[in-house]
Image: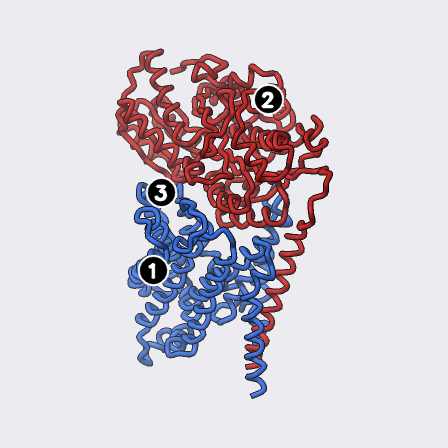
Amino acid sequence: MRGKQWKLFSVILVLVFAASMFAGCGGGDKKAEPQKVTEVKIAFMNPLSGSNVDAGQQDLNAAELAVEDINNAGGIKALGGAKIKLVVVDTTSDPKQAASVAERTFSSEKVAGMVGTGISGLTLPILPVAEKAKVPLITNSINDQITAQGYKYTFQVTPKGSQFGGTQVEFLKFLNEKFKLGITKVAVVYENSGYGVSTAAGVKDIAAKAGLDMVLYEAYPHGFTDASPLVTKIKASGAQALFPVAYTTDAKLIINTMKSMNVNPVIIGGGAGFLWPAFAKEMGDAVNGFVSVASWNWDSKSITANKDLVAVTERYEKKFGTFMTEHAGPTYVAVRLIAEAIEKAGSADPTKVRDALASFNSNTGMAAMMQPGTTKFDEKGWNSPVHPVMIQWQDGKPRTVFPAEDSTRAFEFKK
Amino acid sequence: MKKDVKKYLLTAVAAVLLLAFPLLVDNLYIQHSFFMIFLFATIGLGWNLIGGYGAQLSLGHAAFFAVGAYTAVLFVIYQSLTPLIGGLVGVVIAVAVAGLIGYPCFRLRGPYFTLATIAAGEIVRTLLLHFQDFTGGANGIPLPYKGDNFLFLQFSSKAPYYYLALAMFVVVFFLVRYLEHAKMGRYLAAIREDQDAAESLGVQTHKVKMFALLISAAITAACGVLYAFSVSFIDPDSVAGLNLSIEIAVVVIVGGIGTLWGPVIGSVVVIFLTEMTNLYLGDIRSGASLVLYGLLLILVISIRPQGLSSFFRRN
């Protein structure tokens, strides 16, 4: 019996100890807000560990640059030049942990808003937490479900996953018309993940509507080591165009296997792996000519037409050594939009910031950075004017080539 | 007599503290962390039945967790059925799945059994990915937000989840404590020590192990339901992944395998370590938090292979 008592007692002790430790590093910010605000905190949540760390790192670079730019320009003027401080939080790549981390951040830090995450599977568990904590968040992840839940504090600045297919199919039509390719048979191969499934599903629906013949619709596991069964299926299907949805290493594997098996359909990439600097590193000069859909690109017309925005992409490139990526651009915009909303609301109170975001509608300043140059949130919190673009790698960088209203370079046809 | 009084007093104090906890600590994060501690302690208690007392190491328990979570959530999505009923259906299905897994797998022993459970877990995950039109596939399913609604287990505060997890924990704790000393516990202990000897003494090992697995699966599935509604989002990787199966086993192994308090202590330590390493090292870019978490686990296991609860054992 004595042994049991001790056990019970020790567990209680450990629990109390744990509570005090949590409390020590958590709470304590309960004091009334001082009259003069000198610092406004914005939470940054993204995966800085685990399998999604590549994306999280690009997001972090962009967010830090945005904060630097805001503070160098005099901070939040409506609050007497208060400086922005980024509260950097690692969601890890585990959705369970993402929810827990969000809970911690919102209950221990007084933040005016939040940016992140860039990964749909990590964003979705954070949404209800932010809603309950009444903290507005701007995400750059693309899942359609993010703004379909009726959350009032959720804002999605990027195009939705289901739009990507539309842009890719439009682009294929454009190729067919311009180069008389006569492509009717298409294949989709996609990674079996949230991003893969939603992008691939978009292509499938729209291809059917456009009268294309979907001869293959095949998933593969992320990180697979042998693509030849997949490529054999592509070959057997007789597809003239291929829509691969893949991250960098898988994309490289598929492309190389296709080359060695002499399978040469027109490839129209589905984002991510086809866009990141790592793709250029892996492929070397062979990268030039590849095309892909992108939720954002650094040289779309709305950016190149505005020297302030060009300066942002140049600063990013100088500081981090690569062009501003699809992840980085919208994250930069997200931080700037929250700052602008604080400015407009004249307050760092998250509910007021939320209201300012909800009525946001601008085509100047940083809002012009998202294609087509206007940012405004609809009643569901989605940036409704936004649409994806097509890029082609030229001179070692992704360039916007489609649609015409956003393109800065002409598509170069190589066969 | 005096000892008994002391024991009841301590238990009463613990009960009052745990019940009053959300009133004393209004920090949502701490409430959430305690929710996770109770949740994992409960799953650990369930896992321990078969993995600890019966020494049949399972690395497929995420399958039951996922079946519970998905069934309840899909009922809400397609039928608007309250998870109070949908969850029960989930538990029943998980028990059926456990029967399907256990029947062939219990013919295997040791590492072969463990490998079979890994495969079973992966099958469930792959099925969830495959039937994407129904399950949402890799996209996962977010629960539609309905505001405060007890029937749909949605609350704007954390406290209700805390109490639900606490209640579940208490029920399962006393159930396991009872089973430990009941016939089944003795049978399992005999199987753990020497399965052949147990059989020669007339223990129907297959039946006993199956019974332990079914209870274990039911507990795990119930926890899956609660988890799904507290986080409002599930996807195959987070509820049916091998990672979760391992985490469940780690909780018990760290705390002390085959002991009543092991899963409880293990859950406190593991959740605490996860959160603390993330808090203090999370903004370091290289994922240092996970490295430290791993190192600490290695340390615990190498110093106390019997688990932390063995510090309190008096012999």
State whether residue B19 appears in this view. yes
Provide residue B143's location: percent of width, then percent of height.
41, 46
Front in this rendered view, residue B298 or A368:
A368
* Palette colour of chain B: blue
| Marks 3 and 2 close (CB-CB < 8 Å) | no
Answer yes or no: are tags 3 and 2 on the same subunit.
no
Provide the chain ID for the residue under circle 1: B
Q: Taking B195 as reference, is A327 left or right?
A: right
Q: Which residue is mark 2?
A: A365
Provide residue A243's location: percent of width, then percent of height.
36, 27
Q: Earlier in the sequence, mark 1 or mark 3?
A: 1
Q: What's the residue type where badge 3 is placed?
A: Gly
Q: What's the residue type where badge 2 is placed?
A: Gly
Provide residue A201's location: percent of width, then percent of height.
34, 33
**How dense is the environment of label 1, judged by Cα within 10 Å: few (below 14), some, or many (20 and up)?**
some
Q: Which residue is mark 3?
A: B136
